[in-house]
């Protein structure tokens, strides 16, 4: 597979959106893909036009279009000065930002979208909306997200040293492995395959469940059940590591099984590894209950200062080594 043939970088003139530029430079120089800087501007209201005073709608829109392109051209020159080695194009669109980004992405399925986000959560995001969330929900393209806010802007590394791939035993989550393998080959990077399984407290609470994620569990002491499941999960992760090594000339592959909450465990692991990148599959679910990205993906994007590459997996992926059609509760316990 080819990582990307184009890199789309949405900008709005703010310092926040500009935080995506270092990540775009990094990916462009690694993949040799060109960059397209895009910015939207809103149409002027009809009441603002006044032919008697020389204010014509078409002329004012054309002027705003030219000013937007001029601003983007300044950013292009700045990126060229930074050392971007691939062509940089600029586009201005007279439509809402999310519509422009989604339209460009849908026309170019091979493109990588690189965006920054405030990492807002809860009611404030529901009130203000999120261009990033709308894009992730609507496009099939992989989307690289850099979280930033006024007091906490992470510095994108010069290159990625550690790629973290959260898995949950399903074929859907494994869809991220191809992207991770390509990136690791490109950057000469270490991959850590991660999975979270429940500890003994879970089995004390749910002692009536005799299987998890397709793996049968004998009714033993809770500590023994948690240990057996962790061992089975590590075996699964090493199988995936061996498969990656067979397909990609990787520098190093490691595995980690945690008994922490999966959301917190991923964020904590990413914070411990230098110059990291989280690569994970997402369904881009739309329901409020799944918090737009899906529960774990959304949490990682909102709380981790490590850039996150969200890969849109197939809608009906085959189940993985822990497969089988289990009850939804079983999947959610380790779902990413």
Image: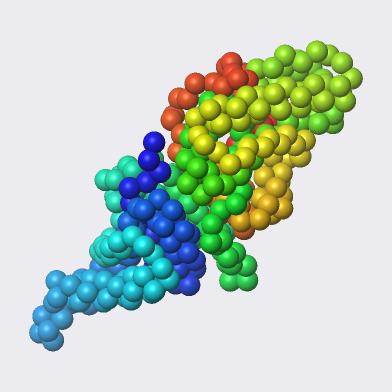
x and y percentages locating residue 185 in the rendered image = 50, 42
Outermost residue toward the bottom? 53
Q: How many discs appear?
A: 0
Q: Quadrant of the N terminus?
A: top left
Image side of residue 107 versus residue 318, left or right: left
In this rendering, is residue 130 above or below 180? Answer: below
x and y percentages locating residue 328 in the rendered image = 61, 25
Q: Nearer the viewer, residue 192 or 16?
A: 192
Residue at image point 14% right, 71% down? 58
Quadrant in which residue 45 is drawn = bottom left
Image side of residue 216 versus residue 134, left or right: right
- Answer whether residue 39 is visible to the viewer in this image: yes
Chosen colour scheme: rainbow
Outermost residue toward the left? 52
- Answer whether residue 204 is visible to the viewer in this image: no
x and y percentages locating residue 26 in the rendered image = 46, 59
Image side of residue 40 versus residue 137, left or right: left
Q: Nearer the viewer, residue 1 or 167?
A: 1
In this rendering, is residue 15 above or below 157? Answer: below
Residue at image point 71% right, 44% down? 265
Q: Quadrant of the C terminus?
A: top right
x and y percentages locating residue 242 in the rendered image = 60, 27
Residue at image point 59% right, 16% down? 324
Residue at image point 68% right, 52% down? 273
Image side of residue 278 versus residue 75, left or right: right
């Amino acid at each position: 597979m080819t990582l990307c043939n184009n890199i789309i970088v949405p900008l709005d003139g703010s310092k926040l959106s500009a935080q995506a530029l270092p990540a775009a430079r990094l990916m462009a120089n690694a993949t040799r893909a060109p960059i397209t800087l895009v910015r939207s501007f809103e149409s002027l209201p009809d009441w603002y036009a006044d032919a008697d005073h020389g204010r014509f709608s078409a002329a004012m829109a054309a002027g705003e279009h030219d000013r937007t392109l001029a601003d983007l051209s300044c950013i292009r020159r700045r990126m060229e000065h930074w050392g971007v080695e691939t062509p940089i194009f600029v586009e201005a669109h007279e439509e809402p930002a999310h519509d422009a980004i989604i339209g460009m992405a849908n026309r170019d399925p091979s493109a990588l979208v690189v965006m920054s986000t405030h990492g807002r959560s809860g009611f404030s995001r529901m009130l203000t909306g999120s261009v990033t969330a709308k894009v992730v929900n609507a496009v099939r393209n992989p989307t690289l997200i850099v979280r930033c806010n006024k007091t906490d802007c992470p510095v994108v590394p010069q290159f990625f040293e550690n790629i973290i791939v959260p898995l949950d035993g399903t074929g859907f989550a494994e869809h991220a492995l191809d992207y991770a393998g390509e990136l690791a080959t490109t950057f000469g990077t270490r991959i850590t395959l991660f999975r979270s399984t429940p500890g003994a407290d879970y089995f004390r609470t749910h002692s009536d469940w005799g299987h998890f994620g397709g793996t049968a569990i004998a009714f033993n002491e809770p500590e023994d059940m948690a240990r057996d499941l962790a061992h089975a999960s590590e075996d699964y992760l090493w199988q995936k590591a061996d498969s990656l090594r067979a397909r990609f000339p990787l520098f190093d592959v490691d595995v980690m099984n945690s008994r922490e909450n999966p959301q917190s465990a991923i964020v904590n692991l990413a914070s411990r590894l230098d110059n990291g990148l989280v690569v994970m599959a997402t369904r881009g679910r739309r329901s409020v209950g799944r918090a737009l990205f899906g529960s774990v993906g959304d949490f990682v994007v909102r709380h981790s200062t490590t850039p996150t590459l969200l890969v849109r997996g197939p809608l009906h992926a085959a189940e993985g080594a822990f497969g089988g059609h289990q009850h939804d509760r079983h999947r959610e316990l380790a779902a990413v």
